Image (spheres, rainbow, N blue to C red):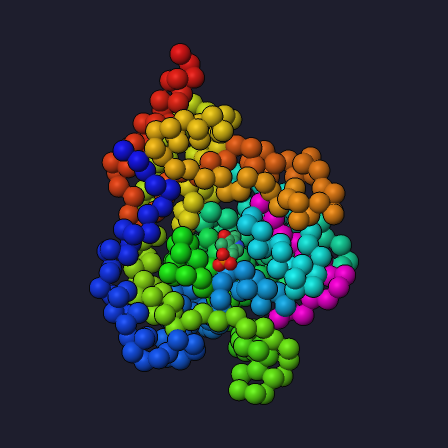
Amino acid sequence: MTVPFADLQLQYQSIKGKIDAAIASVIRANAFIRGPYVDAFERDFAKVASAKHCVSCANGTDALYLAIATLKVKPGDEVITTAHSWISTSAMITHAGAAVKFCDTDGVTFTIDPAAIEAAITPRTVGIVPVHLYGQPANMDAIMGIARKHGLWVIEDCAQAHLATYKGQMVGTFGAAATYSFYPGKNLGAMGDGGAVVTNDAAFAEQVAMLARHGGLVKHQHQIEGINSRLDGIQAAILSAKLPHLADWTRARQIAAEFYSATLSQIEDVEVPNVVAERSHVYHLYTIRHPKRDALAAHLKAKGIETAINYPTMLPLLPAYQRLGFRPEEFPNAFNDQQSILSLPMFAEISRVQQLEVITSVREFKVDETD
Ligand SMILES: *Cc1c(COP(=O)(O)O)cnc(C)c1O
């Protein structure tokens, strides 16, 4: 038996009628760019994300760029983010015009360490971009406390954390704005690229929309030099068809994660995801730590089980940041995780049989080792 890392076909098959009808209606209406399907999705997603406004865009990377650029960062400004994320988070800080300052993770949740943020603040710091990595919220009380104390803005990268909550409050509603990705494999995924910025601030939303739409909200009236970043009508209609199922799919991921953790935590050397009290984890990824990660991954691969490393190299050590000359010792937790993390198959439709196959294979690895 093989167990895929994720299975996008199962989700499609489960609501095929709705998806096919959604695509057909966009084609019939010629509503490919902007139009009623995009407007409807923006309205619906704002509600689901507990935000007053949603501005859709081409992908989660653009969403970060649009949000950070709207804060009008300028050369010399420093923006703090985590050493452990997908590169969009830090790259868009740079592209928006600021200097990225990396902080280590907390060694427990894979999210940014508030103590490291405090230590990284200088008179040039203007903002913080926490990432709710793998689907577990960062320490938002501490982060917002630091931001208030130092007069910094916060943009939450929620690309992996649709519907996650911190002390009962939806992620993405703490800072000035938040960004989402609808990449196909994300918890709410399109059948192509998609992204959004959400905010409670009407003026901020208008600036983001202007920047995303050639610098103007009225055709031929370009107030600023913008970019072209759009969610297309077909993707919007697909996302609207999927949105009513997101809560159930999230619950299914959580139930699958609980099953994994209950059994895997009994196996020596396996460290299952640590979920901190009062944070809900939506398990975009189910990531364990293991001291013999590479050997375990090879063992699982031989058994037909797909795994992934998210991510093999922490951001400061990527060639893209070689110019800044970071050393692993500056980010000990992120560096330790870089060598021990392994993401196991996780998707809303994963079956108990598939999970048992994964669990049995992980257990066998231990047996092989002690022979
Ligand atoms: C996926 C992701 C992004 C980028 O989203 P795209 O839609 O792929 O551009 C940004 N940040 C994080 C943490 C992500 O996981």
Q: Is residue 119 left or right of residue 221?
A: right
Q: Nearer the viewer, residue 33 or 241?
A: 33
Direction left: furthest residue? 17
**96, 200: nearer the viewer:** 96
Give the x, y percent position of residue 336.
59, 33
Residue 152 at x, y = what percent? Answer: 66, 61
> Is 67 on the left or on the right of 355, as rendered?
right
Residue drawn at 69 percent across, 51 percent down: 101
Q: Is residue 20 above or below residue 249?
A: below
Q: Residue drawn 64% across and 77% down? A: 225
Q: Quadrant of residue 301?
A: top left
In the figure, residue 363 lies in which quadrant?
top left
Q: Quadrant of the N terminus?
A: top left
Magenta stretch in the rendered image = 70-84
Q: Quadrant of the C terminus?
A: top left
Give percent across and percent down for residue 61.
Answer: 54, 60
Rendered residue at 57%/82% (across/down):
216
Q: Main secondary structure of the magenta part?
A: loop
Number of numbered labels in the structure image: 0
Instruction: Tell whether position 164 is magenta.
Output: no
Residue 262 visible, this orientation: no
**Residue at 55% across / 46% down in the picture?**
111
Q: Is residue 152 above or below residue 283?
A: below
